[in-house]
Image: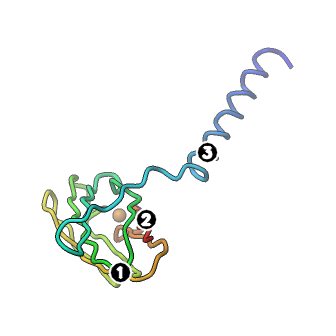
Amino acid sequence: MNTTNVIVTLVGLGIIGWIIWYFWLWKGESVAARSSERGVQEIDVTVKGGYQPSIITAKAGQVLRLNFTRRESTPCGEEVILPDFGKRAHLPQDRTVPVEIRPEKPGEYEFTCGMNMYRGKLIVQ
Ligand SMILES: [Cu+2]
């Protein structure tokens, strides 16, 4: 193996390592919902190329209000679906749409856009 081969191999291994880390190992940052009024927890979620934050932690047995604001014109995030809670909301651009759920059981719940491309996770503790 000459130097070029070694470099190409190392770069290749580096890319593979990064892919494994990024797609399988990295869990991202989670943001906790804040308590607002009595017994209501609340979180603002921006929809732009995905959900920000995409991982939300909340407490079980309390109403959780997710304030979705879609900040992009692409129609991908136009609809948000919380299948475990039977909720679906239309998100007009630049308008905040509150979606209220009441997670009773601790666990992990996904929410997605209408095409299942944007994904977010709700961790109920
Ligand atoms: Cu979509």
Between residue 103 and residue 52, name the one nearer to us.
103
Label count reads 3
Alpha-carbon span between mark 3 and mark 2: 19 Å
Left or right for 17, reference 87: right
Quarter where residue 6 is shown: top right
Amino acid type assigned to the residue bearing label 3 in the image: Trp
Q: Is residue 37 above or below residue 34?
A: below
Left or right for 104, reference 91: right
Residue 32, position in %: x, y?
Answer: 35, 59
Alpha-carbon span between mark 1 and mark 3: 34 Å
Q: Quadrant of ligand 1?
A: bottom left
Left or right for 51, reference 125: left
- Please report contact status of discs 2 and 1: CB closer than 8 Å, yes or no: no
Q: Judging from the image, what secondary structure is the residue with disc 3 in?
A: helix
Counting residues from the start of the chain, the first of labels 3 and 2 encountered is 3
Amino acid type assigned to the residue bearing label 1 in the image: Gly
Q: Which of label 1 and label 3 is nearer to you?
A: 1
| Residue lying farthest to the left in this orientation | 95
Give the number of the disc on residue 61: 1
Q: Residue at x 72, y 25 (%)?
A: 8
Quarter where residue 125 is shown: bottom left
| Residue lying farthest to the top in this orientation | 3
Q: Residue at x 19, y 73 (%)?
A: 38
Residue 92, position in %: x, y?
Answer: 16, 65
What residue did someone put label 3 on?
21
Q: Residue at x 21, y 53 (%)?
A: 71
Q: Which of label 2 and label 1 is nearer to you?
A: 1
